[in-house]
């Protein structure tokens, strides 16, 4: 699994999502993104299209799922392989 955490106070952008996804492809690993400030509209749409799990971190640092792939990851765990 490859994960990225964006601790900034601006919404995570499209480029960050695509870079993480490409890094996961290169490493043959599942990619997961965690953001403190949420996601831009284009970033969210691209992550949904790529089936990349997105989480937002609340002020206690607890991740909350943002999209369907994140919900699936929580329910099923990471895929075998």
Image: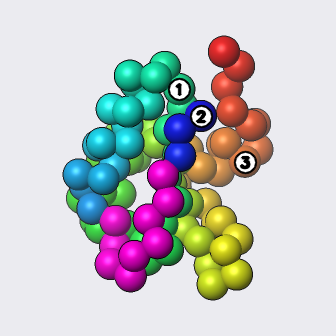
Q: Is the magenta stretch mostly helix, strand or loop?
A: loop
Q: Residue at x 67, y 74 (%)?
A: 61
Residue numbers of the magenta segment: 4-12
Q: Position of residue 34 (x, y in %)?
A: 52, 60
Query: Going by the image, does 45 lie left or right of 70?
Result: left
Tell me the residue that label 3 is attached to.
74
Q: Do the residues labelled 2 and 1 touch (CB within 8 Å)?
A: yes
The verdict on residue 8 being magenta is yes
Query: Going by the image, does 48 lie left or right of 16?
Result: right
Q: Residue 1 carries which label?
A: 2
Q: Residue 29 carries which label?
A: 1
Mark 1 is surrounded, within 10 Å at the Cα level, by few (under 14), some (14 to 19) or many (20 or more) other residues, namely some
Q: Which residue is drawn at 46% across and 23% down?
A: 27
| Observer-nearest of 22 and 45 | 22
Q: Upstream in the sequence, badge 2 or badge 1?
A: 2
- Quote the CA–CA distance across marks 1 and 3: 17 Å
Q: Position of residue 62 (x, y in %)?
A: 70, 71
Against 6, residue 71 (above or below) is: above
Which of the two discs, 2 and 3, sits closer to the camera?
Answer: 2
Q: Upstream in the sequence, badge 2 or badge 3?
A: 2
Q: Please state, as top left, top right, bottom left or bottom right, where the N terminus lies in the image.
A: top right
Against 35, residue 49 (above or below) is: above
Secondary structure at numbered mark 2: loop
Secondary structure at numbered mark 3: helix
The colour mode here is rainbow
Q: Are marks 2 and 3 in contact (CB under 8 Å)?
A: no
Q: Can residue 2 be seen in this view?
A: yes
Against 6, residue 74 (above or below) is: above
Q: Position of residue 31 (x, y in %)?
A: 50, 38
Q: Which quarter of the picture shows residue 55?
A: bottom right
The verdict on residue 64 being magenta is no
Secondary structure at numbered mark 1: loop
């Amino acid at each position: 699994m490859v994960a990225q955490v964006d601790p900034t106070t601006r919404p995570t952008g499209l480029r960050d999502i695509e870079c993480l996804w490409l890094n996961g492809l290169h490493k043959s690993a599942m990619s997961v993104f965690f953001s403190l400030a949420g996601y831009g509209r284009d970033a969210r749409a691209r992550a949904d299209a790529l089936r990349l799990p997105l989480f937002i971190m609340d002020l206690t640092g607890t991740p909350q799922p943002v999209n369907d792939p994140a919900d699936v990851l929580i329910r099923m765990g990471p895929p075998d392989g």
